Image: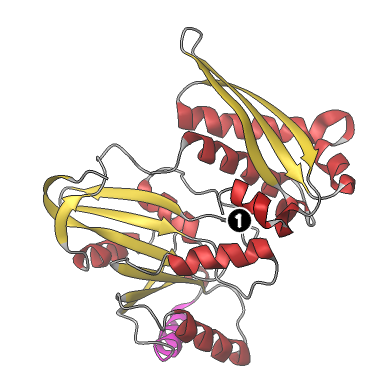
Amino acid sequence: MELSGKPVHSGMVAIVGPPNAGKSTLMNYLLGQKISIVTPKPQTTRNRIMGVVNGDDYQVVFLDTPGLHRARQPLNQEMVRIAMESLTGVDAVVYMIDVSLPLPETKRAELGKEIEEQMQEVESPVILVLNKVDLLDKDQLLAMIDGYSKFYPFHAIFPIAALHGDGTNRLLKEIVSLLPMGPRYFPEDIPTDATERFLVTEMIREKVFLLTGQEIPYSTAVQIESFKEDEARGLITIHAAIVLERDSQKGIVIGKGGKKLKQIGTAARVDIEEMLGSRVLLKLWVKIRKNWSQDERFLRELGF
C-alpha cells in the first residue's frame, strides 16, 4: 500500500461490540455513504469491512466488524474470529452497545465480564460508545454511563444516536486526537478497499435479510457468477447466485411465480446502480448447497 501526502492524524480504528449495536450504521454515517449493509436483524455483518473517513488534517480507517457473541456454528465462529483479529494492530477501538435494549442487572454483570475478556489483550485506547441514547431519558443515561464505567478502564464514554448522527462529531474528534501523525493510507477519493463484486454481494444479501423471514437470511450466501461491463452501452450485467442450505428454503426465496426473487433483485439493483453510477442488469437465481454454513471449504470460497 503506497502512503502519500503531508503528515496528518492517520490510523486504524476497529468498531466492535455485540450484534446489532449499530456499528455499520455509525461507519456509514461517518463516511457519508453506504458501504456496510444494515438491517434490523442481528449478525448482518459477516466480514470485516473497511471505511476511510477523511478531513483536512486526518484520515481515519475504520474497520466495521461482525458482532461479538458466543458462537457455536463454524460460520459464526469465523465471524467472531474476524472481529477479534481486528483488535490487533489498531490505534484505537470503538466498543459499541445498543442501550435501548433491556439489560437486567444479572445480564449487565455478564456483559461486563465479556467486555473485560474481549478487551484483555487490547493495548490501544478503548472508547465505549452508547448508541441510541435518544431513546433514553437523561437520568437513565447518567446511571448507565456510571455503571458501564466500572466494567473496564475505557479511555472515554460517548453517548450517541448513530442513525441521526447525534454526538458523532464529538466522537470523531476524540478518535482523531488519539491517532499518530503520518501520511494518509489511502487516496482521499477511495472510501473503502472492498471490491465492487464484494459490495454487490452484500447489497443482494441485505435485501434477502430485509425481505425474507425466519431462518432464511442466516442460511443465505451470495456468489457473483459473472460481472461484465459494456462501456458502449453504459451497462453492467451481473449474474449472481443466492445460495441456500436446504431445498425447502428455495420456494420461500423464489416466491409464487418468482415474485419474491424479483422483489429482491429489483431492490438490490437500485442500490447497486447508485454505487456503481451505471445502469445494471441484475440476474439472480437460487441454488442449494447443503449445510454450507458448516462447510469450512465453502466458507473459504466466500472469503472467510
Nearest to the observer: residue 24 or residue 161: 24
Q: Residue at x 53, y 40 (%)?
A: 198
Q: Which image quarter: residue 242?
A: top right
| Color encoding of the figure | secondary structure
Q: Magenta-highlighted stretch: main secondary structure?
A: helix
Nearest to the observer: residue 292 or residue 68: 292
Q: Picture coordinates of residue 101 (x, y %)?
A: 60, 74
Q: Picture coordinates of residue 268 (x, y %)?
A: 62, 34
On the question of residue 16 being in view, the answer is no
Q: Amino acid at mark 1?
A: Thr
Q: Residue at x 36, y 56 (%)?
A: 62
- Position of residue 50 relative to residue 84, above or below, is above
> Farthest left residue?
6
Q: Residue at x 65, y 72 (%)?
A: 71
Q: Is residue 232 left or right of residue 12?
A: right
Q: Residue at x 56, y 72 (%)?
A: 100
Number of marks = 1
Q: Give the magenta-colored segment's residue range.
A: 137-150
Q: Is residue 246 left or right of residue 224?
A: right
Q: Which image quarter: residue 153?
A: bottom left
Q: Which residue is mark 1?
A: 44
Q: Quadrant of the N terminus?
A: top left
